[in-house]
Image: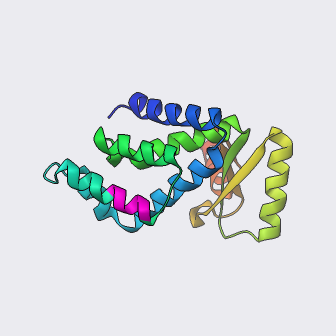
Amino acid sequence: MSSAVLSRYARSLADIVFEKKIEGKVTKDLQTWREIFLTCPELLEAFDAPQVPEDSKERVLDELLVRYPAHPVTSNFLRIMLQRNRIRFFNQILENYLKLVNHRNGIVTASVTTVAPIPEEEAKRLTETLSRITGKKVNVDLKTDESLIGGVVIQMGSTIFDGSIRTQLAEMKRRLVES
């Protein structure tokens, strides 16, 4: 499935939820469904299986929607995905949708990688600093990578700030080899 098609699904959903001013509810519903599919990957496989009759798939989805009530827009979106055999791309479409929602709400995500977990207070200060620099609300995704040796790597969109010791050592080695 092309990323353009998946983006169209995400964009259509985002347009509807912003028009109806229900992005918070629908986003929460979709994140619940992501958890359902992550917890039970067999469900997503069954929804995608050609040997399972379509009416059985729809019946299971209806039963799940009774068990996990969702906004009608969310329910209709899931039904359309199921009927058009796109449900297997749920996670990719959700990621595209979340990027659009965040963009429209002026929110950026910063991936922050350090050698060891950073204290909560330091993470809060980092978030505030990044928000001040960008002029936007920043969601920080904290990761650890021991191979950095020390320092920090921050990625926001296509911008990367690499202040890791690993990169500094590699740069020093490159300069020594050149001279």
Picture quadrant where residue 61 is located = bottom left
* Residue at image point 54% right, 40% down: 97
For the record, the magenta segment spans 61-66
Residue 48 makes an appearance in the image: yes
77 horizontally vs 166: left or right: left
Coordinates of residue 141 in the picture (x, y in percent): 65, 57
Q: Is residue 35 above or below residue 1?
A: below
* Residue at image point 46% right, 57% down: 34
* Residue at image point 65% right, 49% down: 24
* Residue at image point 21% right, 48% down: 54
Is residue 119 part of the magenta span, yes or no? no
Q: How many tags in the picture?
A: 0
154 horizontally vs 130: left or right: left
The residue nearer to you, when weighing 44 against 173, is 44
Coordinates of residue 93 in the picture (x, y in percent): 45, 42
Residue 163 makes an appearance in the image: no
Coordinates of residue 155 in the picture (x, y in percent): 65, 46
Q: Which color scheme does this rendered protein use? A: rainbow
**Quadrant in which the C terminus appears:** top right
**Quadrant in which the N terminus appears:** top left
Q: Of helix, strand and loop, which mostly describes the magenta segment?
A: helix
Coordinates of residue 31 in the picture (x, y in percent): 53, 56
